[in-house]
Image (cartoon, coloured by chain):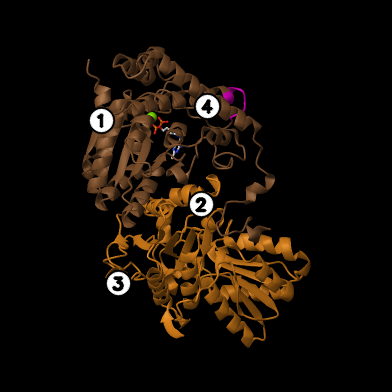
Chain colours: A orange, B brown
């Protein structure tokens, strides 16, 4: 174990997997010489050279499409989109190609691709650079969606994603890059895709979250503990595959649920989790499920009002109190 | 008279070119019939008229070179060596189809013949071809990626991104534009600021040329030369092949945007009889030989239709299969 940042944990995962398997290749805008906009690819060019670590033109759809083609040709590309906002320019290759090819060709093709993309709001980057688009990808069958919240998960999930034979949208949170945690240095350490993590056990209410919202949920739980409220925090880790079994079991135990997600509320991840709870735990629910989410607005710039649009610890605390105060 | 054809290829190969073009035509015309009967459904885009392109180009490639294409791609797969039975069964939506009936007419794929897919998003195949070429170069395989596309596709950003990228990374991609003058009902002059498509590569320092796509030998020789250049230099190249589709864009297209006279003009240049005539004139084959090849192709297609008709539909359970790799037959988290 070593303490390191989420950024360095991702970097470590990339390096370990590139050393382990020469078919792993990396490309994206500014990933080689500049070492990445968020420095996740630091040192890669120096260690692995120009043949494997490549700067690309600003052509997002082609970044993903070339990954699709080279995966069909036997490689395991782990490419970077500078931010998830630009993934919208690559939606054709992501949704119409990467997610479809295996199925529409009758299972004859395998696409071991990772598309890494930083995202999320909170840095006053304005409406076009602050989005949380995970629901877009979760909506579409044929791709996996990973949303790590801790440095350890960042490393373990990225290693699993690179080794997996399915395409994975790997969504990193920009505000987590500097967060620190203990990370196993073992090269064989991985975190399986599709297994949620009970970050904290509790008995009164289950908070279901992912990515940065899991860290926020832990902070809310710590605060609520002072008032004698015991929260269980379930970190989803991946949205596809979705570990419905783990979070429904938790809610069956506590009888109450709060779902926290940074994405927009309408048709958001929280909406999906909430309906799964009603479908699977209806008889166990003691109160209506509470949803905490980003506001349904294009993100404003000003710090003072941007904050209103992104879930805060107080929002989660309030939702927990609400769910405890209500009953069916 | 000295045979120019024989100077280029042995008799067997010359006959093969003719045989393949005839097979493509027979296959496509049979598809039209099966569509009218309701056996083939969905979108059906036929290739009749353009045979010299698929046949000539494929003859100029190596067997293991990658090929990607669009939705008008049955002949490109057939010429590559796809089993007509499995292609027809795919069009019928049967479980014995090339893609188990999950792809249909627009989505043929067979890695065994390096046919890496028909794609129905116009221009979606460009980056995929570039990626295949990268994989080949990275692994030192010496294969090139041949990318078929239409005149309509060159106005997609993907075309320009792909040309730039392939030149920048020095990748062996052979871009093969089938200029049949229309993207559905929009003429190339109404869609391209510079309708001389091969000239559009100059912004990317990619060499290019134009070739007569109604002449199978011309296509073959141009593609062979270009493919060798691409392989040797590990650089992209583009060929604009001038051709014409005899039928509508798809079976749903009545074709009101072009005159009967125009279609007749091009039909007079039908690449199949034109090549047959040359073969006979230059003494490579007799008329009887040609008739024999025609009859053979007709039989192959007839057998393909029977095979498709008699094949079983996919099991209902197939809807959950082949979506994710890794052994799970279904999406386990949804069950
Ligand atoms: C991205 C996209 N836009 C529009 C369409 C609808 N569409 C299908 S084929 C076609 C025309 C393409 O023309 P061209 O590239 O010349 O190919 P051709 O049909 O002539 O072989 C269009 C517009 C599509 N399939 N994909
Ligand atoms: Mg066209």
Q: State yes or no: residue A59 in magenta.
A: no
Q: Tag 2 or tag 3, which sits nearer the N-term?
A: 3
Residue drawn 23% across the image and 42% down it? B229
Q: State yes or no: residue B38 in magenta.
A: yes
- Under circle 4, the secondary element is helix
Q: Tag 1 or tag 4, which sits nearer the N-term?
A: 1
User: In this picture, which residue range is highlighted in magenta?
Assistant: B34-40
Depth order, front residue of B223/B250: B223
- Under circle 3, the secondary element is helix
According to the picture, the residue beneath numbered tag 4 turns out to be B300
According to the picture, the residue beneath numbered tag 2 turns out to be A99
State whether discs 4 and 2 lie on one chain. Answer: no
According to the picture, the residue beneath numbered tag 3 turns out to be A47
Q: CA distance from mark 1 to mark 2?
A: 36 Å
> Residues at badges 4 and 2 in contact (C-beta under 8 Å)?
no
Q: CA distance from mark 4 to mark 1?
A: 34 Å
- Under circle 1, the secondary element is strand
According to the picture, the residue beneath numbered tag 1 turns out to be B210
Query: Quick check: A131 left or right of B228?
Result: right
Could one spot residue B152 in this view of the protein?
A: yes
Residue drawn 72% across the image and 60% down it? A279
């Amino acid at each position: 174990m070593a303490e390191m940042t989420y950024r360095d944990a991702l970097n470590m995962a990339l390096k370990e997997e590139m050393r382990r398997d020469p078919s792993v290749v990396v490309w994206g805008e500014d990933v080689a010489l500049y070492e990445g906009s968020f420095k996740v690819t630091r040192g890669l060019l120096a260690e692995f050279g120009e043949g494997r670590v490549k700067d690309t033109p600003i052509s997002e759809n082609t970044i993903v499409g070339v990954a699709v083609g080279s995966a069909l040709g036997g490689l395991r590309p782990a490419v970077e989109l500078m931010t998830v906002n630009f993934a919208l320019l690559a939606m054709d290759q992501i949704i119409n190609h990467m997610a479809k090819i295996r199925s529409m060709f009758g299972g004859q093709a395998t696409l071991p691709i990772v598309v890494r993309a930083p995202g999320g709001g909170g840095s006053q980057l304005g409406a076009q650079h602050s989005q949380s688009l995970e629901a877009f990808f979760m909506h579409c069958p044929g791709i996996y969606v990973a949303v790590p919240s801790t440095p350890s998960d960042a490393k373990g999930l990225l290693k699993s994603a690179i080794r997996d034979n399915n395409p994975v949208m790997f969504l990193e949170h920009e505000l987590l890059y500097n967060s620190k945690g203990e990370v196993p240095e073992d090269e064989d350490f991985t975190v399986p895709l599709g297994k949620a993590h009970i970050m904290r056990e509790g008995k009164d209410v289950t908070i279901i979250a992912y990515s940065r919202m899991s860290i926020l949920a832990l902070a809310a739980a710590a605060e609520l503990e002072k008032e004698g409220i015991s929260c269980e925090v379930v970190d989803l880790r991946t949205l596809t595959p979705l570990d419905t079994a783990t979070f429904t079991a938790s809610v069956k135990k506590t009888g109450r649920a709060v779902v926290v997600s940074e994405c927009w509320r309408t048709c958001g991840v929280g909406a999906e989790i909430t309906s799964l709870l009603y479908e699977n735990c209806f008889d166990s629910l003691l109160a209506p499920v509470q949803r905490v989410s980003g506001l349904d607005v294009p993100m404003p710039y000003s710090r003072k009002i941007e904050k209103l649009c992104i879930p805060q610890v107080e929002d989660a605390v309030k939702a927990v109190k609400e769910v405890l105060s209500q009953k069916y | 008279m000295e045979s120019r054809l024989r100077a280029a290829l042995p008799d067997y190969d010359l006959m093969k070119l003719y045989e393949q073009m005839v097979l493509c035509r027979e296959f496509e015309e049979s598809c039209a019939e099966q569509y009218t009967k309701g056996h083939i459904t969905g979108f059906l885009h036929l290739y009749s008229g353009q045979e010299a392109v698929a046949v000539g180009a494929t003859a100029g490639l190596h067997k293991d070179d990658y090929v990607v294409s669009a939705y008008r791609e049955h002949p490109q797969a057939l010429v590559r060596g796809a089993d007509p039975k499995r292609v027809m069964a795919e069009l019928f939506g049967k479980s014995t189809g090339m893609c188990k009936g999950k792809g249909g007419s627009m989505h043929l794929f067979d890695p065994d013949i390096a046919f890496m897919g028909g794609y129905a998003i116009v221009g979606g195949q460009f980056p995929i071809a570039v990626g295949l070429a990268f994989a080949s170069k990275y692994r030192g395989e010496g294969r090139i990626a041949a990318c078929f596309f239409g005149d309509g596709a060159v106005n997609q950003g993907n075309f320009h991104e792909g040309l730039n990228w392939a030149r920048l990374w020095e990748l062996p991609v052979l871009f093969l534009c089938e200029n049949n003058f229309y993207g559905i009902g929009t003429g190339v002059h109404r869609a391209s600021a510079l309708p001389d498509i091969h000239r559009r590569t100059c912004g990317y320092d990619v060499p290019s040329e134009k070739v007569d796509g109604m002449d199978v030998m011309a296509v073959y020789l141009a593609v062979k030369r270009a493919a060798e250049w691409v392989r040797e230099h590990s650089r992209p190249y583009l060929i604009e092949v001038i051709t014409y589709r005899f039928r509508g864009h798809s079976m749903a297209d009545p074709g009101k945007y072009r005159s009967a006279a125009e279609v007749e003009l091009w039909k007079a240049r039908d690449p199949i009889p034109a090549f047959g005539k040359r073969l006979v004139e230059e003494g490579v084959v007799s008329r009887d030989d040609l008739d024999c090849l025609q009859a053979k192709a007709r039989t192959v297609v007839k057998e393909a239709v029977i095979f498709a008709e008699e094949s079983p539909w996919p099991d209902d359970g197939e809807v959950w299969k082949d979506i994710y790799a890794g052994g799970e037959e279904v999406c386990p988290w949804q069950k």
